[in-house]
Image (tube, rainbow, N blue to C red):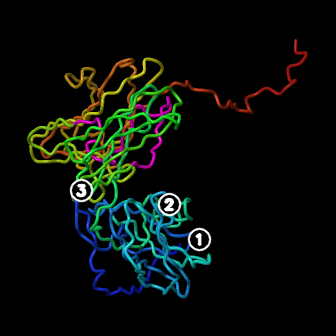
Amino acid sequence: MKKLMTLIIVILSVSIFAGNVQNINGQKSSQKGWADYSGSPAWIWSEPGERAMYYNVEDFGMEYPVDFYAVQALLYQDNVDYHFKIYDKDGSTLLWESADSVSAEGAWQMTEVAAPVVLADDFWLVLAGSSSGGPVPNTVVDAGDGGYGAHSYTGTAGAWTSIAGYEGYGETGMNYNHSMLAYLEPDSTDIFPPLPREVTGTSNFMDTPAPISVRIIDPNDVVSASGEWTIDYLTWTPFALTESKSSHNFTGVVPGQVDGASGAIRFIAADSLGNSGTSSEYPISWSKDNAILDEGFEGSFVPSGWTLDTSAAGAGFIKSVASDPNGSIIHSGNACASHGYDAVDNDDWLISPAIIIPDTNFTTLSFWQAGYWADYITEHEVAISTDGGGTWTQIYLDNDALDPDVSETYEQKFFFLDTYKGQTINIGWHYTGNDADQWFIDDVSVLYDYAGPSIVDIAGNAALLPTVGAYLNND
């Protein structure tokens, strides 16, 4: 890999393809333009393998279906044949493929489609070598500053590997992206059934009902939605979906199953135009190895089953992403929960769903926390309720502004929950303060430990061991 020291960029001037699609916080948008995950050009990518980008148009404030019109990529090698492809969400089903073109070093090079490609779900945009199987030209990767997280991969169809934090670059852990853009417009006709998004609740602790949550989107109203589940893939059992107050968010429950059970769920939905259909299948499982609670705050906020208790004065806990204007610290993924430093009297709770603590062995709560302006902290508290939030028992307190426990570096916190064996509990994160600090919470989990420690090795200092036979016949 080489650092990109000098780069001559040829900007294509085509009036129809002007402007960038901007993220407008997930609101429905009729915008059109270049959907661009990349940031500042910084590195030359010369590794073998095709270059791929995973696109979710909701990141740019659009909704499916969309029309794909063109692609452009920043190449850094002369006279190499290349072409573009689009794969379906599965990463292996080919939807479109261009003819070959010839690369030019330091140039944004664009390929248009003969007719718009209608895309009804997430897709993979891929740069490959010649259609006869030649090498891929060198390309340009950004500095990891695109603001959308990592969306870029290398490899071949169905076997993509993320380039985030690639060791060939200067700094690991960065969200590097290929300099490759897609020109998209909202599709003017709706001929597709509603589309399930952000399905959660599919990985469950043994014997625990599965709290399914799904966001179902459509350019028109979703008039009906239901689910089906199976364990044997022969019999599909229906389960009801209830729409929440926030449009297109649905929840349902699949009965708990024994340890080791697995199967699938799927959704049936229809819109106001009469478009209806059954979704693809989503795997579901129950195991004592699955977390009792596992939440990274990547989807809709608040997550299904979680609740907020917010004082009238402040904004309370919110979902925070890397592009937030007030700054954000994310432990993993692209989002976390956070509480800001509003200059009002804040007294706010973020409360987990009710969970049952097993009455055997050990159960542990784990979460990661970080913060800004910790020397202004008033109080961070974590507490347990056994009566649905009526009363709370404190298990963690951070309220010393001179020596705060939280810092700008994420730290994992652990708490044993053995006191609550056999009980149903809620866990609450409680923030109080006025113009105080900023608190970030990520990767919350409650785990069941059913196996005691085992001895894997025994070692000793050979210098202290006696010589075999040294004491034979010693009277």
Q: Which mark is residue 91?
A: 2
Give the mark nearest the N terminus, 1 or 2. Answer: 1
Q: Amino acid at mark 3?
A: Asn
Q: Looking at the picture, does residue 470 appear above or below residue 462?
A: above
Give the mark nearest the N terminus, 3 or 1. Answer: 1
Cα–Cα span, label 3 and label 2: 28 Å
> Is residue 187 or residue 171 the one in the foreground?
187
Q: Are the residues flagged by discs 1 and 2 in contact, CB closer than 8 Å?
A: no
Residue corresponding to mark 3: 220
Dot 3, crowdedness within 10 Å: few (<14), some or many (≥20)? some
Question: Is residue 276 found left or right of 171 in the rendered image?
Answer: left
Residue that appears at 47% across and 34% down: 290
Q: Which mark is residue 48?
A: 1
Residue 407 spot, x, y in % from top left: 31, 46
Q: Amino acid at mark 2?
A: Gly
Could you say whether the residue bearing mark 3 is in a helix, strand or loop? loop
Could you say whether the residue bearing mark 2 is in a helix, strand or loop? loop
Q: Which mark is residue 94?
A: none
* Residue numbers of the magenta segment: 278-307
* Front label number (3 vs 2): 3
Farthest-out residue, top: 475
Residue 295 visible? The answer is yes
Residue that appears at 39% across and 51% down: 333
